[in-house]
Amino acid sequence: MNFRSWFRPFEILKKEHNIALIVIWVVMVVGYWFVATSGEEKLFPPPEKVIAGLQALYGEGLVVHIASSLGLCLKATLISVVVSLFFAYLSPVPFMRPVAIGLSRMRYLPLTGITFYLAMMMHDARSMQVGVLVIFMSLYFITSLLGVIKDSPQEEIDHARSLKCSRWEVLWEVIVKGRFDYVIEVLRQNLAITWMMLVTVESILVAAGGLGVLIKNSDKFMNHGRIVALQLVILLVGLGIDWILNTTRKSLFRYSKI
Amino acid sequence: MNHYEQKDTILHAENVSVSYGEKTIIKDINFLERDTVRPGKVQGQVIAFLGRSGRGKSTLFRVITGLNKPTTGHVLIPDSTKKPIDGKIPAKDVEEGDVGFVDQRYTLFRHKTVYQALTYAMRNSTLSKAEKNDKIMRYLVEWGLEKSKDQYPNELSGGQRQRTAILEQLLSSGHYIVMDEPFSGLDIGNILNVKTAFKLINESHDLNTIIFSTHDIELAVELADSLYVIGYPRNAEGKLETFGTILHHYDLKAMGIAWHDSFGAQHRDLAEEVKKALLAS
């Protein structure tokens, strides 16, 4: 085994070398965690506290809270995908372009101001959570989708035009159908932001459960073991969603090589 | 000398110019091509455009294919939807889709398999579903693509991709196909593939017309029956202008060197002459 190659920039390693590197890093991080939390002074809770926190959380209905967060995420995602696709797909139409670009720019709006108006408009916390998430997800989603549309090669548009496609057919074939795999990829990238925001939204607006509420409660009592356990759970659920979306894209779209 | 006859006009560019603001890209482009008929042989037309980079070949091609409207002038083709008047088919301005266009990257729909792409190309055809299928399958066999019919563009080899792109345009546009530098960056095998495609197109219908550009002078002389040199003209002071126009036209049919299997001395002389014309433009 040539270990020198591990330290040479741009070196392409064999699969088993890559796996070995991941294992080494995981062992080092976990080892550091054990060592760093074994003394008197410690910033992070030791592993046994995290495991205890996890057990306590499970006893308090962690699975139900995860399901609640996932449900909220799914609902908000579906609505925002429909809204974002509508505006993004119409952006090649000159009349609609300023609207799509304008919405994309709105991503710089602060969250607090929006929640104030939403609170006045909506009467139940769950709708408000969905509303906040939809608004913010859509703005990021539209921004990414506009990038995908802008990067669609002119050759593909000309190719469709040369096949007697009307302008609406060009939009349908090149952008809508031809870039559908990109929608999943964009969703996958934006879901990381959404997932992060979901927890914040749940903790800002104390509603019926969710991972955000659990974190908020644990935070109040400075229960570090529970906080780190929850962080790990949120990370793993997020990674799981990411994996599902990536696998879906690859299996549904054979031609997709993003 | 091969015997041939020139029949009706199939392509006519009349005072075509394209400008973007103050910048004129091409100006005063005029040419006329007729249907060539050879006794006892199905013979399409192959028209080559040669010119140095930036002389406006691609701009002219976009006008010929109707993808861009010229600033002045017209590109006319026969209007097959109209009845002949005095035995002649009326002309019409070329529109998007009338003339097939294959770019040098052989662009295809990334989300359609070969068969789906060809079916889509025939969506406006009046043929029945079964007839369309028969026609597509026949072409797939002739062009050596039957085993790749369910593959997506990213699963095709360069040669298969070229053939699909050409076939798609043939099935959609009918008789005209413009190819912008179809030999650019190809290896010897793929060059042969494209040459075979030219032959297949040419021998399948009298009205089939290939219009292509290339930087390979010998290849243009070998394949074309009509060759245009596009470049910067010289003004009264002998200085080069900054817009492209047609500087020379070589009718290889009239010269007796079209449709030859071998590349003879006359071909070499013409290639040399074209080379000098290009360098001077």
Image (spheres, coloured by chain):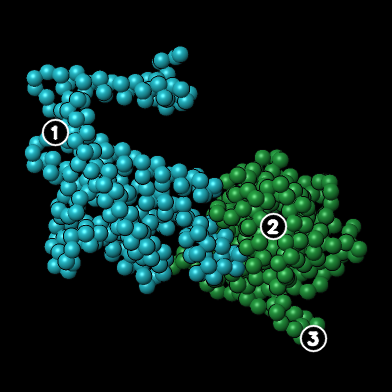
Chain colours: A cyan, B green
Using the image, name the chain to which the residue with label 1 belongs.
A
- Residue at point 57% right, 68% down? A165
Disc 2 + disc 3, Cβ < 8 Å: no
Give the amino acid type for the residue marked by disc 2 in the picture: Leu
Using the image, name the chain to which the residue with label 2 belongs.
B
Q: CA distance from mark 2 to mark 3?
A: 34 Å
Give the amino acid type for the residue marked by disc 3 in the picture: Asp
- Residue at point 25% right, 35% down? A232
- Residue at point 79% right, 86% down? B86
In this view of the protein, can residue B17 be seen by the observer?
A: no
Residue farthest toward the bottom in the current orientation of the protein: B86
Q: Nearer the viewer, residue A65 or B209?
A: A65
SS at mark 3?
A: loop
Residue A208: image quadrant is: bottom left
Q: Nearer the viewer, residue A108 or A27?
A: A27
Residue A95, percent from left and from top:
37, 73
- Do the dots labelled 2 and 3 sit on one chain? yes
* Residue position marked by numbered label 3 in the rendering: B86
Q: Is residue B77 above or below residue B262?
A: below
Number of residues whose C-alpha sits closer than 10 Å to that of mark 3, classed few (under 14), some (14–19) or many (20 or more)? few
Q: CA distance from mark 2 to mark 1?
A: 66 Å
Mark 2 or 3: the one toward you: 2
> Could you tell which of marks 2 and 3 lies nearer the N-terminus?
3
The circle drawn on residue B167 is: 2
Q: CA distance from mark 3 to mark 1?
A: 94 Å
Residue A195, percent from left and from top:
28, 47
Mark 3 or 1: the one toward you: 1
Mark 2 or 1: the one toward you: 1
Residue B204: image quadrant is: bottom right
- Do the dots labelled 3 and 1 sit on one chain? no
SS at mark 2?
A: helix
* Residue position marked by numbered label 1 in the rendering: A224
